Image (cartoon, helix red, strand yellow):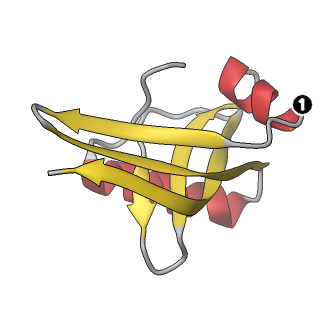
Amino acid sequence: MVAVGFTWDPDTGLARVITSASSRKARHVQAGSPRAVVAQVDGRRWLALEGVPTVSTDPERVAEAVRRYASRYRQPGDNPSRVVIEVAVDRVLGHG
């Protein structure tokens, strides 16, 4: 488990995490991790999005993930080895 910034796209059902291709997160997914969960906690309120993860190097998919990340958090620095982990969410848990 590691803290990450993620975005949620309800239209496609995807949670996205940008990272380096060499990161442990990306390598874990590429090695065949069958499930992934991203979560957020705010006091007593919490949300968990769970589903099947994939890693994409497709420039359009990575650019969309960067755009969404910048909109939610801040513009990330340049990273020529950036990939996006897309979690096809099939389970949503939460409280609050």
67 relative position to 42: left or right: right
Q: Locate residue 1 relative to residue 33 in the image: left or right.
A: left
Residue at the spot of label 1: 31
Going by the numbered disc 1, the residue's amino acid type is: Ala
Residue ranking furthest to the bottom: 11
Is residue 23 in sight in this rendering? no
- Label 1 packing within 10 angstroms: few (<14), some (14-19), many (20+): few
Q: Quadrant of residue 45?
A: top left
**Where's the N terminus, which quadrant?**
top right
Give the vertical position of 52 relative to 32 (above or below). Answer: below
The foreground one among 72 and 74 is 72
Residue at image x 10%, y 31%? 43
Secondary element at image label 1: loop
Front residue of 59/31: it is 31
| Residue 60 relative to residue 32: left or right | left
The residue that appears at 39% across and 39% down in the rendered structure is 39
> Looking at the image, can residue 6 be seen?
yes
- At a point 50% along the width and 19% down the height, the residue shown is 2
Q: Name the spot of residue 65 as percent of width and height, x first.
A: 52, 56
Counting labels gives 1
Residue 22, horizontal then vertical, whole percent? 76, 22
- Give x and y (percent) for residue 78: 52, 34
Determine the residue located farthest toward the right in the rendered image.
31
Q: Position of residue 96 (x, y in %)?
A: 14, 51
Whether 77 is drawn above or below 72: the answer is above
Compared with 68, 41 (above or below) is: above
Q: Nearer the viewer, residue 30 or 94?
A: 94
